Amino acid sequence: MPGVYKLGFFRKLLIGLGKRIYYRKAEKVNVLGVSLMIRAVLRQYQEVLGSLDKAMKIFQSQVAITADEVITNLIYEPLMLGVSMSFALSRAIQDGPFTIHALIWGMIGKAYNKTFEYPLLELNEDGTGKFIIRTKGKSCILCSGVHDVTIEDLGDNDYGDILATLFGTIIREAWKYLESPYELLESKETKCILRGDPCCEITISFKSKY
């Protein structure tokens, strides 16, 4: 069975070092640049489709496809010293926050410490639960600096659903690879500064398959 049953202290230590080495060697993700690019793409979609609501739905579907390809490559292709990301994947649900933190940190580096709180896990006795990823106040990498979007423009969507789609797809594919006993139900932004909340929050809900 792929992955490990549980992340031990030594493996977590290596992963903590590895995420920094990977970030230094990998192509850097400029958080501000990505945010501006997403806004520009959404504006173009909005002009063609007639509303931001429709533009975000289309963009999120494309994010899911791209995220699926990225996580598949990360799982199977060696990152450094012949070791792939599967080294960091654990079947223990309690290791989820640590792994989520390491994956995001590996992509955006120290910007994580300025932007996100450490992920939380809420696990119920019936096997249902959720991961919660919150920004540090209003330091959202997508919403900060957005002043031309109203609640009416958003419709049924939230701006952060783009990130929620990305994180949810990564977790779903990782669990599929691990043959995890858990099934992802929904990944959704549940708080957004564009709607007046004090921070942005992504909630990833799941349930046990058995």
Image (cartoon, rainbow, N blue to C red):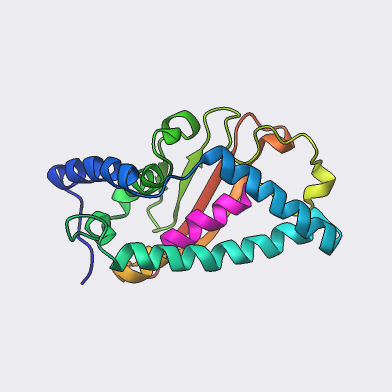
**Residue numbers of the magenta segment:** 160-172
Q: Is residue 37 left or right of residue 54?
A: left
Residue 126 is situated, as x and y percent measured from the top left of the image, at: 40, 58
Looking at the image, which is closer to me, 25 or 208? 25
Q: Compared to 22, does 200 lie above or below?
A: above
Q: Is residue 104 left or right of residue 186?
A: left
Quarter that holds the N terminus: bottom left
Q: Report the residue that reaches farthest toward the left.
A: 10
Residue 107 is situated, as x and y percent measured from the top left of the image, at: 41, 47
Q: Can residue 91 be seen in this view?
A: no
**173 in the magenta segment:** no
Q: Is residue 97 visible?
A: yes
Identify the residue at image location x=53%, y=34%. Answer: 135
Q: Compared to 209, does 19 lie above or below?
A: above
Looking at the image, which is closer to me, 198 or 183? 198
Identify the residue at image location x=61%, y=66%. Answer: 62
Chief SS of the magenta region: helix
